[in-house]
Amino acid sequence: MNDPYSTSWHRDKTLFTPGPLTTSLSVKQAMLHDAGSWHYEFHKVVNSIRDRLLAIAGVEREKDGYEVVLLQGSGTYGVEATLASAVPETGKVLVLSNGAYGERIIAMLRLMKVDFDVIRTAEDVPPDPSAVENTLRQNPDLTHVIMVHCETTTGIMNPIHEVGRIVREQGRQFIVDAMSSFGALPISFQDGCIDYLISSPNKCLEGVPGFTYVILRRALLEANRGHQRSLSMDLLHQMEYFEQKGQFRYTPPTHTLLAFHQALLEFEEEGGLPGREKRYRHNHAVLMEEMTRLGFRAHLDPSIQSPIITSFHFPDDPAFEFKKFYMLLSDQGMIIYPGKLTDTECFRIGNIGRIFEHDIRQLALAIERALKIMGVTLT
Amino acid sequence: MNDPYSTSWHRDKTLFTPGPLTTSLSVKQAMLHDAGSWHYEFHKVVNSIRDRLLAIAGVEREKDGYEVVLLQGSGTYGVEATLASAVPETGKVLVLSNGAYGERIIAMLRLMKVDFDVIRTAEDVPPDPSAVENTLRQNPDLTHVIMVHCETTTGIMNPIHEVGRIVREQGRQFIVDAMSSFGALPISFQDGCIDYLISSPNKCLEGVPGFTYVILRRALLEANRGHQRSLSMDLLHQMEYFEQKGQFRYTPPTHTLLAFHQALLEFEEEGGLPGREKRYRHNHAVLMEEMTRLGFRAHLDPSIQSPIITSFHFPDDPAFEFKKFYMLLSDQGMIIYPGKLTDTECFRIGNIGRIFEHDIRQLALAIERALKIMGVTLT
């Protein structure tokens, strides 16, 4: 078989996706090492990652009672492990859903046989914090609330801080899926009253995929001791193993972790979150400028649009065919992302990863050329 | 913090462990690419991996009805996902345990609330196939049997083929954890009547860690539709997604997969399983020769010892201290593995990975030197 990545003439295409992303060469080069997963030198790297993640979150172990747990698997595993480790058998979860990732949480809860309620809004409508407040007041059996910060289905920003304060006031626990936002958009654990936050190394922190992490209030996880549902997805014992032995319970993705450590150093070099946010916001502004110039319409109102990933409507011209459009961009070395909306034909463009203004400008030129080849005109 | 892997003077230590292992530079270099997980070029690599794994297993899709499912996470996730996807609520599992990995399966089943029985033998005693036969005859409620092929707790080889034939005769399903043996030791899916086999890319196939895979009889997995317990650990829908969309359901560890594809090409270059087995058996023979020369005693009888990993008793000299011994070897650039036996003080040496005779000879010299420094004599 023809492995396009291992041929000598291959050059990587630029990824305008929600992740896995284009990363720096130095991040990938950090994987040119075989580390012993039981070795003290490797444990130093793991512990440095844990410390740095807490620093990015702006929380401290002793003062604030937060801890971070790394877990093998994709981000979805992190969300499932959090629910499996945080919610007791008698618990009931309120899910705020306005996209595919909210619906995925519902699918998880169903399979785990955990009771839940849903506040569902349209894919372009953020949940209303006062609706959350009413639902919590009327349903004292609800114990946890979970929501997605940046829904990559559309790219919408959901109001986690406003909702979090209500959840805390109402004495429930608050879980945030911050997969595509952590590290690039300010999140206040204290103001947002966040009890559990799940994210991924291969999003705004620009590492490579292979594990997930959860930043959590230690005491809450410990209070749920004895209610774990799965060995692999048990955050409590994973946390205790890190604390007692300095390592993962089961084989960690050693190379991915070495890459992530390098990615964190480069994140700090860029000025930490403010530096990363500035570049992404600029990338996004350039993307909107170029796409508007070309006549594309973004799906979301700018007031709720994240600077991470953007959904654009298909052009209103029968000559437009997404598959062909995608391939014409791929042939020019650029990879965009299909849409995920249930009722509107969209494609998505991500502007995170090791991507700069000139990459966005080049993408716009490639799009212009692809439209010309397809004979598509935008009005 | 001081990251020992990213300093300019760092050279990797050689890993004499059960994995993660020392891999070839070319396998690691295959990770110097960012692949789009939704992109057709990456799907080609994933599908080539799936085809090659079935070829190594010696089974065919159409003719034999086997399929392979890749899953994010460590090998432990593969075992848990198999149990979670194969065993219905009314199922009952017979676990054959003679080590830590057998016990881990029991821990999984407990948390999943799946009913089970155990045939437990001492850590240096393989299960007796006739005991399995009797237990199955006497307990018609048992639906599945699971065992570990090579228990890395000791390095013992368990008789999967003999047990498998009995399980099939008795009309039950047979699950094999072949984490540390697949690719290096002959396994006959037909003779051993194997229904599900779980393994890992970072063992005898010499890839890097980050996912796991299960080779399984399609029809059995499909027959258990509707009995899944977890979204992340659902092998059925993972399989269907590969078949329908050519890709993982959730973000795959793209770099790890590129490395594994390269590792499979190098496996084929070495002559496939016979070539790999030959090198490992030679490595092991040299290890036994050298360790015997130094006066060490292996824990297992040679008739049940695998050529993968070997447990050696601590020298009977109070001057021996494992931690110091470990560090003296580490300082010489070699990493061995601690013991895992419940009642005997042992350390373990693995001889798999990109390891050759000269590496084993050098390890023996380093051990000799460490003993001299510690003032340990072996009789």
Image: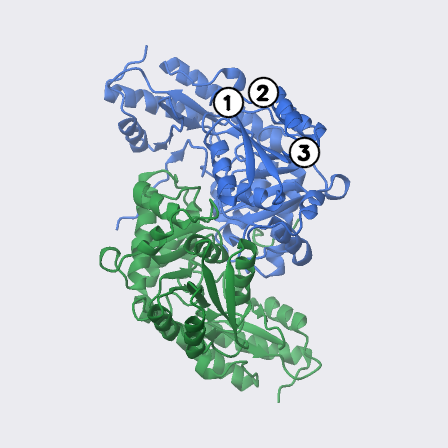
Chain colours: A green, B blue
Q: Secondary structure at mark 3?
A: loop
Tell me if residue B164 comes above or below residue A340 in the rendering: above
Vertical placement of residue B203 versus B131, above or below: below
Within-10-Å neighbours for mark 3: few <14, some 14–19, many 20+: some
Q: Earlier in the sequence, mark 3 or mark 1?
A: 1
Residue type of the residue flagged with mark 3: Arg
Q: Chain of mark 2?
A: B
Tag 2: amino acid: Asp
Residue A377 visible: yes
> Is there CB contact under 8 Å for labels 3 and 1?
no
- Image point (26%, 55%), residue name: A61
- Residue denoted by label 2: B128
Q: On the image, numbered disc 3 is attached to which residue? A: B172
- State yes or no: discs 1 and 2 in contact (Cβ < 8 Å): yes
Q: Amino acid at mark 1?
A: Thr
What residue is at 65 percent from the left and 73 percent from the top?
Answer: A322
Mark 1 secondary-structure assignment: loop
From mark 1 to mark 2, how far is it between C-alphas?
A: 9 Å
Q: Residue furthest right?
A: B63
**Dot 1 falls on which chain?**
B
Q: Earlier in the sequence, mark 3 or mark 2?
A: 2
Real-space Cα distance between discs 3 and 2? Answer: 17 Å
Question: Which of the 4 image quadrants contains residue B126?
Answer: top right
Q: Which residue is found at the position 24% from the left and 19% from the top? A: B319
The residue that mark 1 highlights is B121
Q: Could you tell me which quadrant the C terminus of chain A lies in?
A: bottom right
